[in-house]
Image (cartoon, helix red, strand yellow):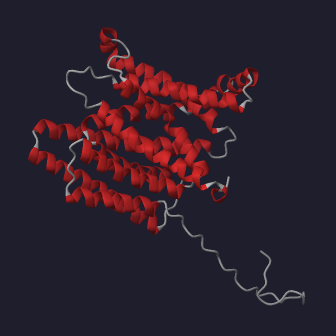
């Protein structure tokens, strides 16, 4: 589908949907992790499992629809690509494990960082993705992209330093330590996001398997690993308080929004374009800062605003399409024997 042929209402509607998902997920996750002490806190590991299971069900539903809503056709797809392709599933265990770790890290980060700082610092995944693309896919970058990556690193560093200084001066040491834990969690999540994304891209290259089947292949080990994480990390709490302890309507909303996030991104890529997706990222950062300042007692410093601006500029710069320079053909040194071919005309 050409983006020029898409109705503006669908194109920009999908963009608004993506911005809402980006802002809503981060703010709701932050809100759900900063409840009153009197309220029972839900377990992040169970939330990750619930999200992975819900996403797995959604992807199976999409394959069922693509199979003409026929159970026999659906079962044939699953049998061919899952049970009869164990090596394909095994290859996707690597990103499955990393995505499970990443999702748990994001909950840890938003338990210790405000939404705005998290939103800005998590953009460092662009840098990690570029580094792994260069190593694993032998991808080359133009001077503009290298400049944008440098500006991104500078902007994220300024945000981290400005925030740490502010907390160290105004709050207790424990709060400062919590912030460090949050920043480390964001950085580790950005690394796992970059590696798993490039690894998944490498597997997808040259493959005729649909993206929904690939997500099922990756979702199956993800569900198993997320379930194992619950009992390795929180088995005592689950036995004592139950699997869904602390779950409220807000928590279920977080799980649902996170599960359908991939579908929304796919919708934007299909009906909009990558440039609009980048602007959605920049706009979501601004909106997160504004809402955090109003509702979460967030007070950005000038250095934080400067660093955030650098991050948004670098994001736009990095996603700017590069112009392909045509190579000029050298004039032929051989004599032209066909009189109908005039000087300067060449067969391409």
Q: Could you say where residue 28 lies in the image, as x and y percent from the top left?
A: 35, 35
Q: Could you say where residue 188 lies in the image, as x and y percent from the top left?
A: 34, 41
Q: Is residue 346 above or below residue 270?
A: below
Residue that extends furthest to the top in the rendered view of this protein: 240
Q: Decide which of 37, 314 is in the foreground and name it.
A: 37
Q: Residue at x 51, y 50 (%)?
A: 15
Q: Decide which of 229, 311 is in the foreground and name it.
A: 311
Q: Is residue 260 above or below residue 75?
A: below
Residue 87 visible within the image: no
Q: Decide which of 44, 299 is in the foreground and name it.
A: 299
Residue 40 visible within the image: yes
Total numbered badges shown on the rendered structure? 0
Q: Residue at x 45, y 52 (%)?
A: 280
Q: Could you say where residue 301 lies in the image, as x and y percent from the top left?
A: 19, 55
Residue that extends furthest to the front in the rendered view of this protein: 9
Q: Quarter of the image for the C terminus: give it.
A: bottom right
């Amino acid at each position: 589908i050409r983006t020029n042929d898409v109705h503006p209402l669908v194109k920009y509607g999908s963009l608004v949907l993506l911005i809402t998902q980006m802002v809503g997920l981060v703010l709701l996750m932050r809100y759900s992790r900063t409840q009153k002490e009197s309220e029972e806190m839900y377990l992040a590991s169970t939330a990750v499992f619930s999200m992975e299971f819900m996403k797995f069900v959604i992807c199976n539903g999409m394959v069922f629809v693509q199979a003409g809503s026929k159970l026999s056709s659906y079962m044939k797809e699953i049998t061919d690509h899952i049970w009869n392709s164990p090596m394909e599933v095994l290859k996707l265990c690597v990103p499955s494990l990393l995505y499970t770790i990443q999702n748990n890290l994001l909950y840890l980060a938003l338990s210790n960082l405000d939404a705005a700082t998290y939103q800005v610092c998590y953009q460092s995944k662009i840098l990690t993705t570029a580094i792994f693309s260069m190593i694993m896919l032998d991808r080359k970058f133009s001077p503009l992209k290298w400049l944008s990556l440098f500006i991104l690193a500078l902007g994220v560093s300024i945000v981290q330093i400005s925030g740490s200084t502010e907390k160290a001066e105004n709050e207790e040491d424990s709060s400062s330590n919590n912030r460090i834990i949050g920043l480390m969690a964001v950085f580790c999540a950005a690394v796992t996001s970059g590696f798993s994304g490039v690894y998944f891209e490498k597997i997808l290259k040259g493959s005729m398997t649909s993206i929904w089947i690939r997500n099922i292949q990756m979702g199956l080990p993800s569900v198993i690993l997320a379930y194992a994480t619950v009992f390795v990390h929180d088995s005592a709490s689950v036995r004592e308080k139950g699997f869904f302890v602390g779950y409220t309507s807000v928590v279920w909303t977080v799980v649902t929004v996170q599960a359908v996030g991939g579908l929304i991104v796919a919708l934007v890529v299909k009906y909009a374009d990558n440039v609009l997706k980048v602007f959605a990222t920049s706009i979501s950062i601004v909106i997160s800062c504004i809402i955090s300042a109003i509702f979460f007692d967030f007070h950005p410093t000038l250095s934080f605003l400067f660093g955030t601006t650098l991050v948004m500029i670098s994001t736009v710069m990095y996603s700017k399409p590069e112009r392909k320079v045509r190579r000029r053909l050298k004039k032929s040194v051989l004599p032209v024997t066909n009189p109908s071919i005039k000087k300067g005309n060449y067969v391409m």
